[in-house]
Amino acid sequence: MALLKLSSAICSSAFALGVAPSLPHAASTSSRSLSWKRSSPFHGALPSTVSSPSGLPSSVVAPRASQATGVSAEAENLNEKYGTEGVKVQSGEGGLTKVVLSGRDGSEAEVYLYGGCVTSWKAAGGKDLLFVRPDAVFTGKKPISGGLPHCFPQFGPGVIQQHGFARNVTWDIASTQNDGGSPTLVLGLKPSDYSRSIWNYEFSVTFKIVLGEKKLTTEMVVENTDTKSFSFTTALHSYFRADVSKTSVTGLKGCKRLDKPYEDPANPVEGSEDRNVIEFPGFVDTMYMNTPNVLVLDNGLGEKLSIRNEGWTDAVLWNPYLTMEACYKDFVCVENAQLSPVELQPGQSWTAKQSLSLGYMVN
Ligand SMILES: *[C@@H]1O[C@H](CO)[C@@H](O)[C@H](O)[C@H]1NC(C)=O
């Protein structure tokens, strides 16, 4: 029962365990682990949740919000303004506005304005390569648990709420285009009263999503539009559909790692990765520092994805194992991250690209 309650609590919260505080690259090993411990004494603490009589959170028991039937006026207006070849604005789950990108070759991606979250990416004729958790809700009040959610302006727990606010607010469409058959959507995030109440800075974030043939590219640009400097950490908390018993990640051998044991998440263990091929036999929550530009994910379902990055300095692997009994077998998180704080002076900007490509079909 205790475990069930635990799993309910985690499952109904967004990314309760897939988190970590920032840690400055420049710090020495000892002060790094000290500052880690100081800044995350309650990393293992779980948010409270309302459980149904069955002990499962209501979001698990209740069916997922059904597809809205009509198209909202907002989606219609946005589509009139921004719709173009291969880019359509529609009403998605829970009536939330989504943008559907469709390639001439039959590939497809979906992006919710709420959270600026890519929730689906399919190569032509293929299944979804991303994963949305079955307990995800589409209410616009709670971050969407799945796809490629943003953790900004703070990756883990810390001075402001865990994972920041970018995943919990509605982004704007900045522009759309279709160059040479690659549907492109640029989202924008600007400060609001809500964001200022959490993080009192003026900023501009753009997130560009380009759907290519067997390829999905994103580019995030953070600009300081304030008159004072600010610093942030961030990640794309990427959920990939997988058969966790057969999935693996390569490319991290030799990287410095910080491993959060399930039994004692407040005391991460530092080490160096000596495996060439990393599998997911149980609970995994590990941060890797100064990672190479390409990681390869074998999703165990016959697909290999290369995860290429420019500007993202770090990576995080996460699988919640039994803490999310209902779904842990079906996904793995491989996140490009910027774990050490980036400081931007007024007028400065930071850019990071992630490019997901489907290598080849095994079957
Ligand atoms: C998301 O935003 C709502 C307000 O719309 C707020 O009540 C809630 O606490 C936020 N949740 C998270 C996890 O940020």
Image: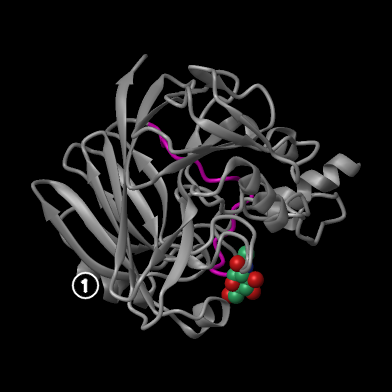
* Residue placed most toward the observer, 26 or 211: 26
Report x, y in % for residue 225: 33, 78
Report x, y in % for residue 201: 45, 79
Q: Is residue 55 above or below residue 127?
A: below
User: Does the residue tagged 1 have its C-beta within 8 Å of any atom of ligand 1?
Assistant: no
- Give the magenta part as a residue range: 127-141
Q: What residue appears at the point 53 percent right and 81 percent down from the top-left corner?
A: 194
Q: Quadrant of ligand 1?
A: bottom right
Q: Residue furthest right?
A: 1
* Residue placed most toward the observer, 336 or 180: 336
Figure coloring: one colour
Q: Is residue 357 visible?
A: yes
| Residue neighbourhood size for the residue with mark 1, other residues' Cα within 10 Å, grouped as few (<14), some (14–19), many (≥20) | few
Residue for badge 1: 80
Report x, y in % for residue 284: 64, 32
| Amino acid at pointer 1 | Glu
Q: Quadrant of the N terminus?
A: top right
Q: Secondary structure at mark 1?
A: helix
Residue 135 is inside the magenta segment: yes
Q: Quadrant of the C terminus?
A: top left
* Residue placed most toward the observer, 154 or 140: 154
* Residue placed most toward the observer, 24 or 258: 24
